[in-house]
Image (cartoon, rainbow, N blue to C red):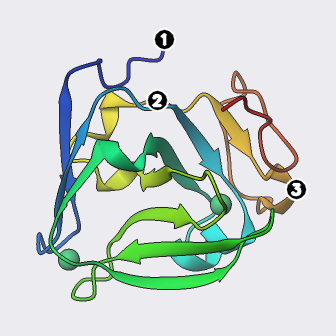
Amino acid sequence: MTMGIAEGQTAEGGCLCGAIRYTVTGSELFTSQCCCKDCQKATGTGHTTIVGLRRAQLELRGEPKTYTNDGDTGGKVTRHFCGNCGGRLFTTGDLPGDEMAILQAGSLDDPNIVSPESVIYVKDAPKWDFFDPALPQFEAMQPRER
Ligand SMILES: [Zn+2]
Ligand SMILES: [Zn+2]
């Protein structure tokens, strides 16, 4: 059911105004619906759809603005967004060994190339938000092997 970006293939994306564009190369690691409080505040929505990548998979054209705060599981979390239109692009962490870039699925030119496999931080989800009942739900972070 999960389609995803095929190995060796690329996907394009960018912000609303087009000042920042990117290319993703290769398969994503995961796609989830994240309901954490920080995602709600950062996006102004009930949840955000995130696509896990290795940083090396993401090639940027343009210079995003950043905002850094403390993450839920220790370490700093930095959100990268367009300083012109405010469009959210991706998130990175500073923990040792963390080479992830967590992309905002809606910034992809074709968001249908990915499909969520889980819902995370459901403890924070607003009552009015709705999720595919077929997806596994996790109170906080989904346990993963890296
Ligand atoms: Zn922009
Ligand atoms: Zn979140």
Is residue 44 visible to us here?
Answer: no
Query: Which amino acid is tagged 2?
Result: Ser
Q: Position of residue 73 (x, y in %)?
A: 81, 62
- Label number found at residue 123: 3
Could you tell me residue 116's position as x and y percent?
Answer: 54, 33
Furthest residue toward front: 96
Which mark is first along the chain, 2 or 1? Answer: 1
The disc placed on residue 65 is none
How far across and down, in percent of the image, does residue 15 sit?
23, 67
Extreme-top residue of the structure:
1
Q: Residues within 10 Å of mark 1 (few under 14, many from 20)?
A: few
What secondary structure is found at the residue carrying circle 3? helix
Q: Check disc 1 and report the residue beneath it.
A: 1
The answer to which of 48 and 69 lies nearer the viewer is 69
Q: Earlier in the sequence, mark 3 or mark 1?
A: 1
Q: Is residue 21 above or below residue 4?
A: below
Give the number of the disc on residue 115.
2
Residue at horizontal 32%, vertical 82%? 86
Q: Is mark 2 within 8 Å of ligand 2?
A: no
Residue type, label 1: Met
| Label 1 element class | loop
Amino acid under label 3? Answer: Lys
Specify the quarter for ligand 1.
bottom left
Q: Position of residue 63 (x, y in %)?
A: 21, 78
The residue depicted at 21 percent of the width and 70 percent of the height is 16
Sequence order check, earlier mark of 3 and 2:
2
Q: Are marks 1 and 2 in contact (CB under 8 Å)?
A: yes
Front residue of 68 and 116: 68
Dividing the picture into quadrants, the one containing residue 83 is bottom left
